[in-house]
Amino acid sequence: MKKILLKNARVVGADGIDEKDVVISGGKILKVCESGEGEDLLANIVDEKSEVTKAADREEGSGEQSFKIGSESDAKSVRTDLGGEGLMGHSLHSCLIIDCSADDTYVLPGLIDAHVHFREPGLTAKGDFASESRAALAGGITTIFDMPNTVPPTSTYEAFKEKVELAKEKCLCNFKLFAGMGGSGAPRYGGANSNRFGFAVEIKKIAKDKKLSRFLAGVKVYMGCSTGCMAGGVDGLERILVEKSLREVPVVVHAEDQNCLNENVEKFDAAVPASHGEARPVECAVEGVKIACHLAKKYDRPIHIAHVTSRVELDVIKKFKDEKVTLGRGLAKEDGEAVTSRGAAKKVVPLITCEVSPRHLFLSDEMYGQFGHLLKVNPPVRSKEIVGDLWNAIYDGEVDIFASDHSPHTLGEKGTEGSGLQGHFPRNAGSCLGSGSGLRPAEAGLPSGMPEVQTMLPLLLNEVSHGKFGLKDIVRMACCNPARIFGLEKVGCVADGYRADLVIVDLGEKYEITRESLLYKCGWSCYEGRVLKGRVKKVILGGEIV
């Protein structure tokens, strides 16, 4: 493994930007030091393992390589789209020096995307761990948390174990997985509703397994029916929150109230794509958020609200923002062992945290005429006015994290009535495609979701050029806060001893998003044709340039 020096780097943290040298060795950030000190530090490193590596490299004829961001020549020896100035002839071996002094070049921690649907197992026509993680890395995302609405759903110990093995084999970036509650593909419990109580037993088994629990991001609860038919409802959410032995396991809530959805479902007309917003109005999300927040307070249990779409939802959350919960004290135990994924050290955390997804910031319901059902997502995109209010809330620091909610479907599934989920999600009793779901066949057959993981950071970089939003906000909301909320250690920050997951960006480069540049298996994006300013140039994952 090469040692890497990021020389004269503008390092972005949640509090600002500092010019530093960043020395990487053994997959970790060895030292963040003052500019000009990095080369001396590299020269003084004495490591038996590295000496073996150097000897092997010398046999292959390699030496120190130095590249300057933004130069014209092609450095084909490194997997990157950046140019290089060739070998510098220094005495150090097996070292790569990257000069980051060019204008508009910045170094960020690798992004943590806490909400993706990579569609494996069972839905691999849409995407899989290999294709979607490749797209994530191209977009500067080095860690992902994958959601459980697959086939079979990730709602049992065995399903979780099998999915971990799949991801270990195929996923190109760091990953964790959510476990979910039931689902139409869970015959053991007969469907979503009947699995609400059996699931608690399954999640305990996962959380108590020392090997598997490393990969557990948390529990995902769908209060209302969405893609994959895993609705646990209010009862399901309460069942998880009341479970004291799972107190340390993060809970993420898709907060749309099913009763409200049932009242509005008849408003959906497949011939009028914009009617999806009428069938899932803001009121359903607001009611879901209210219920979830009150249950969290009732049981003194932190929750994270996924994909907030409006100012009204944030107003509900704001009422609970000063509420805190102490974790790591008085843990309930089963068989003498507490189950935890965030560690047992005592700490005080917010009762409620929340996320916003790019679709609810960069798209609006005025675009249904352009995109049709490609724009169909749950919860729906909102009006330009609501989008503006959401941005103002971000400027004011009211939103904790960005998360892509990457959720690909094929163009064929998106294009015609009846071509979608019936062919992929089993039609079992109690599922969203069953008679009691609250969804009509026309809506159930047009899947909700869109790909986002490759474009999230580029869209945010472009927003920086508008002046109200900074690189430090991206780091706070897409690196530091996700790591804090979900209990990740030594990631999300450019600091000594942290994992060397880094992104080098050029804030000044302009380019167009083209279909050819997209790495998604589904092969499309609602952002095709947009001209952005700010591009991902290099990604370092665990000390390796990828």
Image (cartoon, rainbow, N blue to C red):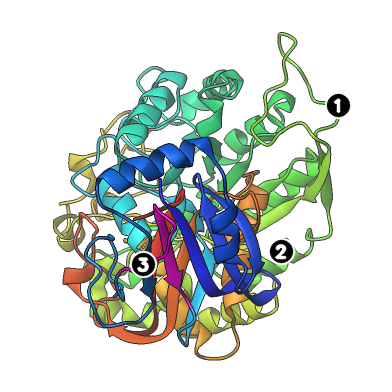
On residue 316, the disc is 2
Mark 2 or 3: the one toward you? 3
Q: Residue at x 27, y 44 (%)?
A: 59
Q: Which quadrant holds residue 458?
A: bottom left
Q: Residue furthest bottom?
A: 466
The vertical placement of 50 against 520, above or below, is above
Name the element at disc 2.
helix
Q: Is residue 297 left or right of 373 when viewed as pictured?
A: right
Q: Which quadrant holds residue 404?
A: bottom left
| Residue 405 appears in view | no
On residue 343, the disc is none
On residue 89, the disc is 3
Marks 1/3: CA distance? 60 Å
Q: Is residue 417 left or right of 250 when viewed as pictured?
A: left
| Residue 67 appears in view | yes
Q: Looking at the image, is mark 1 or mark 3 earlier in the sequence?
A: 3
- Which amino acid lies under the numbered mark 3 shown in the image of this protein? Gly
- Which amino acid lies under the numbered mark 2 shown in the image of this protein? Val
Q: Which residues are magenta?
A: 87-100
Q: Position of residue 434 (x, y in %)?
A: 32, 37
Q: Residue at x 76, y 50 (%)?
A: 351
Residue topped by disc 1: 330
Marks 2/3: CA distance? 61 Å
Mark 1 or 3: the one toward you? 3
